[in-house]
């Protein structure tokens, strides 16, 4: 079966519609369009549209979220984009060089060889262990507020009113994307990838009471009302990391990159098998040998969950 992978880093729903039209014009009409939806930032990708440009062959931000409470956006000038790119290249070169000084070399060694050290370094809580580690210079002092824009969507809308309008505009973009897919005679399936903070409670900031499953609940309600096919991977991802014998070591759970909120190779492998299982169990009339393929997918899912750490 012919499959085209068309995802682009930094694209939101608005840009995905244009991508769909461009691909169809060159490759022909599809029967199924699977939209990989990352819960951590797809709403923000639409809110900050058009946030991505290209500087010297690399993606660069044109718009960024600067106020997670009020939804403040900053539009970067071309000079600012060039300056960001210059600093990025400087950090890249510096990162390829060995750190200088005994303390920096020690931190670098432990960051590569100690799961416990990385747990301390990544942990966002403000408890006594974190403060002690900060005094020793092992980690940065705890931040009083979650500054990451990816955490913005987990705020209650009552505390961040701009989110309510952002959700409405985002839903309109999803409707337009569905209409574009159906205009090509195809079916759209939205696959919701959870952020690492939704799956692993050890990565969540302890000083804020955020609504970790609210985006999924709101999206589920919308998809059901609009009769849009969807698959929420959050329950299965949570079940996987909580299986007996598996340890939650902060960012070192086995589904996500240590320093990124997106799934790693194993996480994407699990997602692929779950999507395949969903498709084979659904009424897509262009799939053949469903029984044989489904049993093979289920077998591989069992093997994946039994893989040694």
Image (tube, helix red, strand yellow):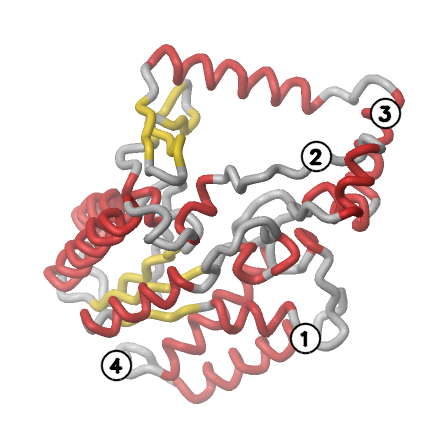
Please state which of the two labelled residues, at mark 3 or mark 2, is closer to the viewer: 2
Between circles 4 and 1, the one closer to the viewer is: 1
Verify CB contact (< 8 Å) between mark 1 and mark 2: no
The N terminus - image quarter: bottom left
Q: Decide if residue 168 is on the left or right side of residue 215.
A: left
Task: Using the image, tell me which numbered label, if any, was put on residue 285.
Answer: 4
**Distance from the alpha carbon under mark 2 to that under mark 4:** 56 Å
C-alpha distance separating marks 3 and 1:
37 Å
To which quarter of the image does residue 180 belong? bottom left
- Of 21 and 214, nearer the camera is 214
In the rendered view, tell whether residue 230 sits above or below residue 285: above
Total tally of numbered discs in the picture: 4
> Disc 2 or 4, which lies upstream in sequence?
2
In this view, the residue in front, 99 or 199, is 199
Give the quadrant of residue 188.
bottom left
Where is mark 2, residue-wise? 141
Label 3 or label 4, whichever lies nearer to me, is 3
Please name the residue that numbered disc 1 is placed on: 243
Residue at figure coordinates x 33%, y 49% from the top left: 43
Q: CA distance from mark 1 to mark 2?
A: 32 Å
Q: Residue at x 83, y 44 (%)?
A: 113
Residue 103: which numbered mark, if any?
A: 3
């Amino acid at each position: 079966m012919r499959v085209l992978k068309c995802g682009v880093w930094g694209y939101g729903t608005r840009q995905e519609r244009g991508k769909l039209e461009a691909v169809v014009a060159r490759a022909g009409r599809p029967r199924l369009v699977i939209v990989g939806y990352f819960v951590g930032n797809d709403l923000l990708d639409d809110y900050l549209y058009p946030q991505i440009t290209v500087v010297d062959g690399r993606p660069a931000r044109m718009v960024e979220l600067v106020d997670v409470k009020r939804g403040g956006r900053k539009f970067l000038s071309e000079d600012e984009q060039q300056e960001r790119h210059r600093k990025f290249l400087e950090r890249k070169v510096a990162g390829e060089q060995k750190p200088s000084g005994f303390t920096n070399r020690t931190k670098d060694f432990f960051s590569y060889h100690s799961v416990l050290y990385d747990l301390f370094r990544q942990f966002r809580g403000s408890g006594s262990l974190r403060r002690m580690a900060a005094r020793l210079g092992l980690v940065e002092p705890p931040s009083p507020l979650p500054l990451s824009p990816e955490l913005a969507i987990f705020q209650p809308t009552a505390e961040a009113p701009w989110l309510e309008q952002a959700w409405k505009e985002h839903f309109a973009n999803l409707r337009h994307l569905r209409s574009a897919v159906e205009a090509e005679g195809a079916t759209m399936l939205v696959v919701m990838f959870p952020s690492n903070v939704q799956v692993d409670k050890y990565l969540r900031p302890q000083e804020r009471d955020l609504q970790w499953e609210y985006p999924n609940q709101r999206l589920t309600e919308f998809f059901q009302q609009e009769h849009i096919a969807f698959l929420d991977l959050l329950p299965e991802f949570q079940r996987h990391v909580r299986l007996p014998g598996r340890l939650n070591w902060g960012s070192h759970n086995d589904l996500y990159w240590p320093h990124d909120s997106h799934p790693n190779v194993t996480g994407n492998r699990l997602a692929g098998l779950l999507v395949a299982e969903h498709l084979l169990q659904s009424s897509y009339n262009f799939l053949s040998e469903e029984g044989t393929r489904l049993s093979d997918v289920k077998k591989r899912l069992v093997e994946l969950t039994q893989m040694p750490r």
